[in-house]
Amino acid sequence: MEIIENFSLKKYNTFGIEAKAKEFTAVHSVDELKTVLAKNQSKKKFILGGGSNMLLTQDIDALVIHIDLKGKKIIREDNDFVWVESQAGENWHEFVLYTINQNFGGLENMSLIPGNVGTTPVQNIGAYGTEIKDTFVSCDAVKIDNQETRTFTKEECNFGYRESIFKNDVKDQYIITSVVFKLTKRNHKINTSYGDITAELAKQGVTTPTLKDVSNAVIAIRQSKLPDPKELGNSGSFFKNPIISKSDFEKVQQKFPDIRFFEVSDSEVKVPAGWLIEQAGFKGKRFGDAGIHKNQALVLVNYGNATGREILNVSKDIQETIFTTFGIHIEAEVNVI
């Protein structure tokens, strides 16, 4: 567990931002993690997973601990379900493909989401009509100040739309080390009703989709809209889709009859942030090396040498314009550091 000083984080964040860590180390087991925490109790710490949901606007004046725990296993199963545990450092998409190859259902709609397994509960990540909470059973986490391990149940995680206890009540207190998912072995609930999945399956000539078919459709859709972070720095969707009251929505709809929306409840409506951003004229615009992707207005990109501060300024400009134009506030989904 070597600690390296003045360490470049450019390869450790999907935006490809050049920022440095005062100190850096990678841990490969829970024991290593506990040892690093115990030996460096007095230091400020920054926990780094896959680096896919953050925007670095400055150097990190702390000990950066990269969670590189690997491994996955079946811990329980019956005729209908299987409980699969993944270590936090496993790549999310590779884990999803592993479950599909085993014919385990539940994660296929979240194919190709960037990042590692350990950070998925923090955001309650989701895509195409599914979220982590739909299959999540529990996660193990190490408390930073005393190195004790705690298991968080689904109920204890207080999942909401891109929300969890790890973003609120226990923020910066725990490091997730593994996650358990309950997946189907048969009678899979194939969900093709959200977004463009049905159209993509039809395009591929699929009439009775399997888990793999749904995953392939999602991958094709995402690849057509979203840039590969290895080729063009980005962090996926930068903004959350705003949820507003129906009464507020009706006022906006009077001015903008074509506004897109999804009913969340009897009293709330979700408005696609990408639609708002595109209508405001930002899609495909570039400001130096910072910009908005040409195929997906939700995605901010680094064309090469943008700083985190430049990308943040673009995001603020978008937020202000959306509020001025529509009276709707859109929140960043990405963590700004």
Image (cartoon, grey):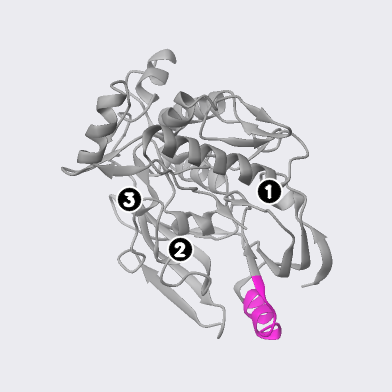
- Image point (48%, 31%), residue name: 277
Residues under numbered marks 2 and 3 in contact, where contact means CB atoms less than 8 Å apart? no
Q: Which residue is mark 1?
A: 309
Q: Label 2 is placed on what type of residue?
A: Lys
- Crowdedness of circle 3 by 10 Å Cα count: few (<14), some, many (20+)? some
Whether residue 1 can be seen here:
yes
Mark 1 → mark 2, Cα distance in angstroms: 23 Å
| Foreground label between 3 and 1 | 1
- Image point (63%, 52%), residue name: 51
Mark 2 → mark 3, Cα distance in angstroms: 19 Å
- Residue nearest the observer in this picture, 143 or 249: 249
- Crowdedness of circle 1 by 10 Å Cα count: few (<14), some, many (20+)? some
Q: Label 3 is placed on what type of residue?
A: Asp
Going from N to C along the chain, the mark reached first, 2 or 3, is 3
The magenta span reads 31-45
Residue 18 vertical position relative to residue 47 in the rendered view, above or below: above
Quarter of the image where one finds residue 311: top right
Of the 4 image quadrants, the one containing the C terminus is bottom right
